[in-house]
Image (tube, grey):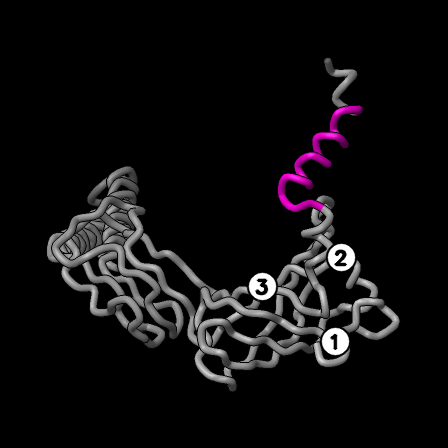
Amino acid sequence: MRALIPILAPIIAAVAMMAAGGPVAAQSIGKDGKVRGVVEAKSAATIGASMTGRITSMPFDEGDAFKRGQVLVAFDCSRNRAEAAAAHAAAGAARERHATNQELDSMGAIGTSEVRQAAADLSRARAEAKALDAAARDCTIYAPYAGRVVERIGNPSETPQVGAPLIRIQRSGDLELRLIVPSRWLVWLEPGTAFDFLVDETGGRHTGTVKGLGASVDPVSKTIRVRAAIDSDGGIVLPGMSGTARFRPPASSGTAPTRGG
């Protein structure tokens, strides 16, 4: 059976191509210099719970804009702050004991081992206080950049587990267009190539610029992925919108648009 796999592989691939529209579909991509594209947010994140606790505030809802540094999620932190305060008090007491033991040691009143023990207790108390400070900081999640809320998953009064998704956000004005173009365009398509983009939802016309090409060609569809920048001068552009990009291939490529197309 293994000996037949190399022989059957091309046949299986051909059948799959025909089932999906095959060569006809591949040839239709890029006809008249037109391809489809989808707008995506270049920077987006799903923020999860950094601690287990009751949510006290989530001030932004879906579609709301926020500034960098604003609070996205706040947890009930009364217990964490109390534990941190107690740890700092314990560290202060350990520091006093260590200082007293050092003074007594200088007068020969105690042994060196007691001084070392006091130093170890002080180091441990400081480490515990630092850890509890970090836990208290986890009580508040701040916006890493200015942006908008894509989806609010959590809600005030809920008590999520650590890592549970709470809110999805995206950076403002940081949009990118994803296109799939014929691999035959690689003879002329390169970063910096300009094109026009017509948005389906709004009918707005925008200018786009190729920013980068994919690392590989799909062997079945003979296409390659393209990243592009898009301006927003032609109206509202939001992630998830789609439309048609129109390139102007050189006449020598054989794919240039026909007159009036």
At a point 79% along the width and 62% down the height, the residue shown is 186
Q: Give the range drawn in magenta.
A: 7-22
At a point 75% along the width and 25% down the height, the residue shown is 8
Q: Which of 80 and 157 is in front in this view?
A: 157
Q: Which of 83 and 109 is in front in this view?
A: 83
At a point 36% along the width and 74% down the height, the residue shown is 68
Q: Name the residue under label 3.
A: 178
The picture places residue 153, in percent across and down from the top left corner, at 26, 55
The quarter in which the N terminus is drawn is top right
Outermost bottom residue: 233
The picture places residue 107, in percent across and down from the top left corner, at 23, 50
Which amino acid type is shown beneath numbered disc 1?
Arg
Q: Can residue 106 be seen in this view?
A: no
The question of residue 38 being in magenta is answered with no
How many neighbours does mark 3 have within 10 angstroms: few (below 14), some (14-19), or many (20 or more)? some
Q: Which mark identifies residue 164? A: none
Q: Is residue 125 left or right of residue 143?
A: left
Q: Examine the image and state in which quarter residue 66 appears.
A: bottom left
The question of residue 13 being in magenta is answered with yes
The picture places residue 148, in percent across and down from the top left corner, at 35, 71
Q: Identify the element where label 3 is drawn.
A: strand
The residues bearing labels 2 and 1 have C-alpha atoms spaced at a distance of: 15 Å
How many neighbours does mark 1 have within 10 angstroms: few (below 14), some (14-19), or many (20 or more)? some
Q: Mark 1 points at which residue?
A: 248
Cβ atoms at labels 3 and 2 below 8 Å apart: no
Which amino acid type is shown beneath numbered disc 3?
Arg
Q: Identify the element where label 2 is drawn.
A: helix
Q: In this view, does 176 lie to the left or right of 224?
A: left
Outermost front residue: 260
Sequence order check, earlier mark of 1 and 3: 3
Q: Mark 2 points at which residue?
A: 183
The residues bearing labels 1 and 3 have C-alpha atoms spaced at a distance of: 18 Å
